[in-house]
Image (spheres, helix red, strand yellow):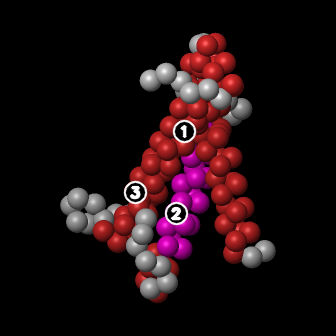
Amino acid sequence: MGLQELEQHRIVKLVKKFDDLTFGQHSMALPFPGTAFYLAKKAAEVIRKDLRSIIKDRKEALSKGNFTMHDVLSYMILAGDSSVRIMPENEIADRIMGLLTAGYNVVAMAITFFMKYVGERPKIQDKILAGKKLPT
């Protein structure tokens, strides 16, 4: 399996875990096996583990000069936090996970509410389906 296939497999795995995490965030906090909340906790552990692995890989690439700083992760690794201390890998993983979770939920929620509101307004729905321009 090549590097591209490994990255694709990693992404598919993370998307599944983010689905579990998102679903569990909107459930009752029952930490028992089989509940959505329990699955979300387990998914968060897997995501953090994968993020720590990505952080280690990125640190290694940065130290060898094989990667330039063009993203948030590289910035966090190199720049640290506001107290000018280098952030530990666990803290970086938690912050990146927060950013990813927030971005993941925002898109899903926006699409959900769009569909809900359009569904509640048949005239707008008809115009969208007909491809007509909506009044401003």
Note whether 3 is above or below 72 in the view shown: below
Q: Position of residue 61 (x, y in %)?
A: 50, 80
Give the structural element (helix, strand or loop) at label 1.
Answer: helix
Note whether 108 is above or below 124 in the view shown: below
Amino acid identity at mark 3 = Glu
Which residues, given as a range, are shown in magenta?
40-58
Q: Position of residue 92 (x, y in %)?
A: 41, 59
Q: Nearer the viewer, residue 56 or 134?
A: 134
* Residue lying at the far right of the rendered structure: 1
Residue under label 1: 107
Residue under label 3: 91
Residue under label 2: 52
Q: Residue at x 53, y 32 (%)?
A: 110
Q: Gap in Å between the C-alphas at discs 3 and 1?
A: 25 Å
Residue 30 at least partly seen:
no
Q: Position of residue 99 (x, y in %)?
A: 45, 49
Say if the magenta span includes residue 132.
no
